[in-house]
Image (cartoon, grey):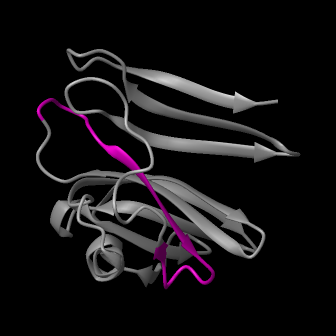
Amino acid sequence: MNAKDPAALWEGGRYVIAYSDLGNPGHDLTIVETEDFKEFRVLARSLIRSQLAAQGNTWAVTHIHAGALVKAGNYYLLLYDALPREPACFGSGWMGMALSRDLRRWVDLTPRSPLWRGAGIDLTFRYVDVVVEEGRYLLYAEEETTGAGRKDLVVYYAA
């Protein structure tokens, strides 16, 4: 597995992992499942190019990362970040979302444009993760906060 930047979910005796696959163009996402970290079954490969691009997504082309993978009711929600082109400064991305019932077929919730961008030269808002517990949530990310490209850890929450 040639992977980086994973997002994992524990569910019913298995781990589901979304990750940047270094073997895919733009490090496009692969989603796998495993019980033991010895054997992996691929559920979706090159997710952006194989599914989301056909739904009209033209902005998620390169520097693709998995952010959070969560289950809400009968649905899986994947937060990811990507860019339409090479960034002006290191470590950039914009936030997108996709939804699935079976982890194999995904619907892009942000096909026309990213859901969230930061301020600054590349408008970075990436490495998003979310914690939801008993009606409260905590969303954190790396956000570009200055015009010069500085990135900070930011947190948004509801109590």
**Above/below status of 108 relative to 158:** below
Q: Position of residue 97 (x, y in %)?
A: 48, 59
Q: In the picture, residue 21 is in which quadrant?
A: bottom left
Residue at x 51% of width, y 24% of height: 154
Residue 90 appears left or right of 77: left
Residue at x 31% of width, y 71% of height: 48
Start-end of magenta stretch: 88-107
* Magenta stretch, overall SS: loop
Of residues 57 and 89, the one drawn nearer to the viewer in this rendering: 57
Q: Position of residue 146 (x, y in %)?
A: 30, 15
Quadrant housing the N terminus: bottom left
For the image, the number of numbered tags is 0
Residue 40 appears left or right of 51: right
Residue at x 47% of width, y 23% of height: 153
Q: Does the magenta stretch include residue 34?
A: no
Q: Position of residue 34 (x, y in %)?
A: 56, 75
Residue at x 34% of width, y 55% of height: 113
**Above/below status of 121 relative to 32:** above
Q: Position of residue 104 (x, y in %)?
A: 50, 84
Residue at the front extreme, as displayed: 112
Q: In the picture, residue 133 is in which quadrant?
A: top right
Residue at the right extreme, as displayed: 134
Quadrant housing the C terminus: top right
